[in-house]
Image: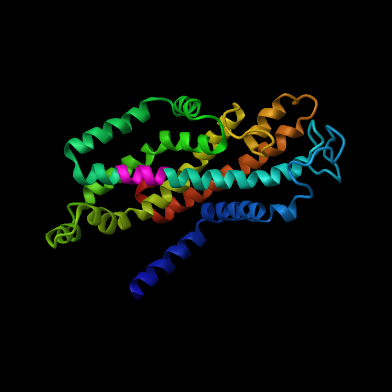
Amino acid sequence: MGGRSNKVKETLLSCLRNWNFMVGFVILLSVILVAVFADVIAPYDYTDQLVGAKYTAPCAEFWFGTDELGRDVFSRTIYGTRITLWVAFLGATLQLVIGVTVGLICGYFGKWVDRVFSFLTDLTWCIPGTILALAVVTLIGKGLTNSVIAISLVSWASYARPIRAKTMSLKTMSFVETGAAFGESAFSLMFRYIFPNVVPSLIVMVSMSLPGTILSTTTLSFLGLGSQAPSPDWGLALSNGINYIGRAPWLSIFPGIALVYTVIGFNLLGEGLRDVLDPHMKAQ
């Protein structure tokens, strides 16, 4: 018990000493706080129209200006953080469930099971993700949740492949063979013995893949297949702002800055976690 406690303390100290981790953590903490207290921070609701003159430039009253309907861009940008975090949470959950399950099954059973699932994995890799996501959204319909589902259905392979490789190496370990000798089921061996040993790598993979999930979902919203008006989604705001880029550039500038700020936070946090939890991945 003491050894595990010391290991946790050592990991925390390593995180505190890692510049990437600390900067990313501070950035994401600020995004989370903004999302949680959006009702307090935002001076208006994101659906309120004509709170100011249309196309008002950034000023003391409207920090980020107003849009074509007189809505406060600052308030809409603030509320957009909730959508981004929801996308990150739902996308990571779906990709983990599919990717980890497929990876464990392929790596543990091997043979024809591995060949079948590996074929499906390779199939998702050989088709450009955005194009495949567009096809899925076309089939299941527009909307934010459908967009996240579409992205997850084409991104799970990035989890399955590393988990498959780690499972193949772990299943020959003595502690797994001992569990099998005592009559443990395949399900128990995979999720009770093997899965806990891939969790550190999973944490790294999730943190590294979240920026891609956010950007892909933003792309679908930009193309009109994700969030629909009057949602404060940043991708939708960028798409709408393009139409007024000459007249009111702030409609695109501020949601774009918020998106870049959040993605940089996830990237830095992911790199920091990779350095601390899985240095071998960095070497690869």
User: Residue 122, image x and y in percent?
Assistant: 31, 30
Q: Please determine whether, in this image, residue 231 is positioned above or below residue 239.
A: below
User: Residue 177, image x and y in percent?
Assistant: 15, 57
User: Residue 231, image x and y in percent?
Assistant: 66, 38
Report the span colored magenta.
95-102
Q: Residue at x 52, y 29 (%)?
A: 141
Q: Residue furthest left?
A: 181
Quarter of the image that includes the C terminus: top left
Q: Is residue 222 magenta?
A: no
Q: Is residue 284 visible?
A: no
Left or right of 44? Residue 197 is left
User: Residue 88, image x and y in percent?
Assistant: 52, 45
Q: Is residue 97 magenta?
A: yes
Q: How is the image coloured?
A: rainbow
Could you say which is closer to the camera, residue 166 or residue 117?
117
Could you say which is closer to the camera, residue 220 or residue 144?
144
Q: Residue furthest bottom?
A: 2
